[in-house]
């Protein structure tokens, strides 16, 4: 019995690494994002990698997940190919940086659609398959199914000058923690993990309009390989939240006790320093 993982946002950054590392773990892959050519390049590279299992299968599905029908078309594609997903990686997402009042309203709603609505719908449509796959027994039993939702340390507090992005990631964290509990109560063989990284070296900063070199210590910003490996390790352990980096784990603890006014002032200062003008 072959096991399948679906990775959204698999054309760059963290998504490519999730795909690479899931292939190494023996999963066949469905790769989704908008750029078909880039997805195909990723697929070809993984298929050519001698380190991956020789029977690795990859399907590429170009889709704009901001479009409400995209999720359902992706699900129908998997059904038509006879693919039952047992690992769902909700990774596609983007941010936007700047003053709220000068932000583009369409961009805000696209961000909410991608970061929140499509992620929620993907979990909802794939959950019956995830449950079935998690129950499967016999030869090659896949075991418990997994959902990895990419949130961010931005989920831990509001973020002046990236207000909508921080709010979307708070949604992802809240939803994931609630589902982690709900699945346990229901006895579903499915876990949900929210991966909360700090800055990672990917295309994210450019898309979000963050000033280049705007991080205090760029040399210490991890690459996607390290963060994806951490996220998958915690996901396969069934952890509810996976915060990457000791500094962010400590600051998450501090955020629980510090006055919200002080937190807002600190985040506002940090984000204001990254404004382009
Ligand atoms: N990098 C960081 O500092 C950081 C920190 C914390 C959390 N995160 C989160 O990590 C996740 C991955 O981001 P990344 O850092 O790897 O950035 P990235 O390199 O910009 O990758 C984003 C991915 O999302 C896909 N995507 C964007 N819009 C899409 C749409 N409408 N429909 C389908 N796919 C879409 C992109 O592919 P196409 O352009 O081909 O569609 C790309 O594959 C995001 O959820 C982000 O919020 C990033």
Image (spheres, rainbow, N blue to C red):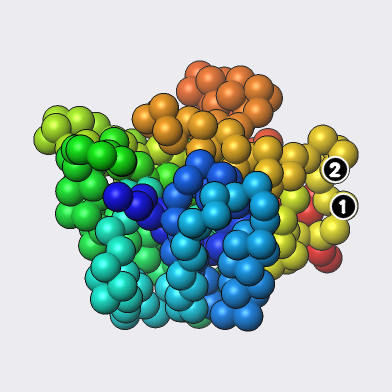
Give the vertical position of 254 relative to 162 (above or below): above
The residue wearing badge 2 is: 218
Give the vertical position of 218 relative to 67 (above or below): above
Q: Quadrant of residue 128?
A: bottom left
Marks 1/2 in contact by CB < 8 Å: the verdict is: yes
Q: Quadrant of residue 165?
A: bottom right
Give the vertical position of 8 relative to 64 (above or below): above
Q: Is residue 189 left or right of residue 171?
A: left
Residue nearest the viewer, comparing 255 with 252 = 252
Cα separation, mark 1 vs mark 2, equals 7 Å
In the image, residue 40 lies at what x, y percent?
60, 74
Query: Badge 1: few (under 14), some or many (20 or more) residues near its Cα, within 10 Å?
Result: few
Residue nearest the viewer, comparing 5 with 260 = 5
In the image, residue 266 lies at what x, y percent?
68, 36
Residue nearest the viewer, comparing 174 with 188 = 188
**What label does residue 170 carry, if any?**
none
SS assignment at label 1: loop
Q: Can residue 51 be seen by looking at this rendering?
A: yes
Give the vertical position of 96 relative to 19 (above or below): below
In the image, residue 119 lies at what x, y percent?
37, 59
SS assignment at label 2: helix
Residue at (41%, 69%) from the top-left corner?
113
């Amino acid at each position: 019995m072959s096991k399948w993982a679906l990775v959204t946002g698999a054309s760059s950054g963290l998504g490519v690494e999730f795909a690479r590392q899931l292939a190494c773990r023996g999963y066949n892959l469905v790769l989704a994002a908008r750029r078909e050519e880039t997805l195909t390049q990723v697929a070809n590279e993984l298929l050519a990698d001698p380190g991956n299992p020789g029977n690795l299968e990859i399907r590429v599905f170009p889709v704009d997940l901001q479009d409400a029908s995209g999720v359902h078309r992706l699900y129908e594609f998997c059904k038509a190919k006879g693919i039952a997903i047992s690992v769902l990686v909700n990774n596609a997402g983007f941010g936007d940086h700047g003053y709220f009042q000068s932000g583009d309203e369409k961009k805000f709603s696209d961000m909410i659609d991608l970061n929140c609505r499509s992620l929620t719908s993907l979990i909802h449509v794939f959950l019956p398959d995830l449950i079935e796959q998690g129950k499967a027994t016999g030869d090659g039993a896949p075991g418990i199914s997994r959902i990895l939702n990419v949130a961010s340390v931005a989920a831990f507090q509001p973020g002046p000058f990236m207000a909508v992005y921080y709010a979307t990631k708070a949604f992802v964290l809240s939803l994931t923690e609630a589902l982690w509990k709900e699945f346990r109560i229901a006895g579903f063989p499915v876990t949900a993990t929210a991966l909360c990284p700090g800055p990672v070296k990917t295309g994210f900063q450019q898309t979000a309009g963050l000033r280049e070199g705007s991080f205090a210590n760029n040399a210490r910003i991890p690459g996607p390989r390290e963060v994806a490996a951490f996220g998958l390790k915690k996901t396969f352990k069934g952890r509810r939240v996976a915060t990457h980096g000791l500094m962010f784990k400590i600051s998450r603890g501090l955020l629980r006790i510090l006055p919200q006014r002080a937190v807002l002032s600190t985040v506002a200062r940090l984000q204001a320093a990254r404004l382009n003008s």
